[in-house]
Image: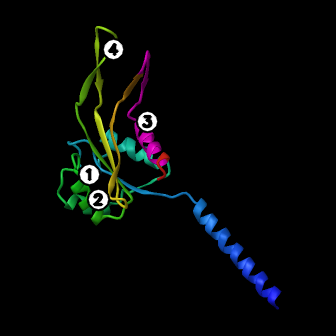
Amino acid sequence: MKFLIKLIFVSFFFQIVTIYSQEKDKPKISSVVIMPFDDYQEYPYNLDYIHQSLTIGFLQKGFEVVTQDSTWEIILDRDLRLTNLNTSDVEKIAKDINVDLIVFGRTSNYSTYRQNGFFSIKPDIKPILIRIYDTKKKEIILFERLTLNKTWGLFTQSISYENFGATIAQQIKNMGY
């Protein structure tokens, strides 16, 4: 009889371990809301190329992008300028909606100059500022000013508007989200 009880206990233990390992192996799907980047667009932001690129990139990498009208109604009722949010505005939005990540930023004409040889200076244009806020950690996990043309020595690598959304989403995926 004791052997039968031990056998049931051991089999029950292995079932629990198997179920736990299967739950742990499932990919974590994070929900993301992507704010607009173009000042002159209105909801549903169909002509905002940065917003569209980020939406497609996050969908390709397995994230759940929030596009429900009810969620956007809550966001738009806050009456904020959504293209230039600060951290306190994002925290207020995070209290109202249930998402894991909030992607926000702005476009600007930000540029710096760097030395290109001995006598010439090359402009380094960084037109897009992207910030990603984790609502569970309550902190910004990515703060990046995107360069569309990366130069390393004599080689230049261009990132198109279509591909940079996937690049940002891959960075977040590599961070464990």
Q: Position of residue 46 (x, y in %)?
A: 32, 45
Determine if the magenta segment contains residue 165. yes
Determine if the magenta segment contains residue 119. no
**Mark 2 vs mark 4: in front:** 4
- The residue pinned by badge 1 equals 43
Q: Earlier in the sequence, mark 4 or mark 3?
A: 4
- The residue pinned by badge 4 equals 116
Label 4 and label 3: CA atoms lie apart by 27 Å
Where disc 2 sits, the SS reads helix
Q: Report if the CB atoms under discs 1 and 2 are less than 8 Å apart.
A: yes
How packed is label 2: few (under 14 Cα within 10 Å), some, or many (20 or more)? Answer: some
Q: How many marks?
A: 4
Where disc 4 sits, the SS reads loop
Q: Which residues are drawn in magenta?
A: 152-173
Label 2 and label 4: CA atoms lie apart by 45 Å
- The residue pinned by badge 2 equals 72
Q: Report if the CB atoms under discs 2 and 4 are less than 8 Å apart.
A: no
**Residue 34: assigned label:** none
- The residue pinned by badge 3 equals 163
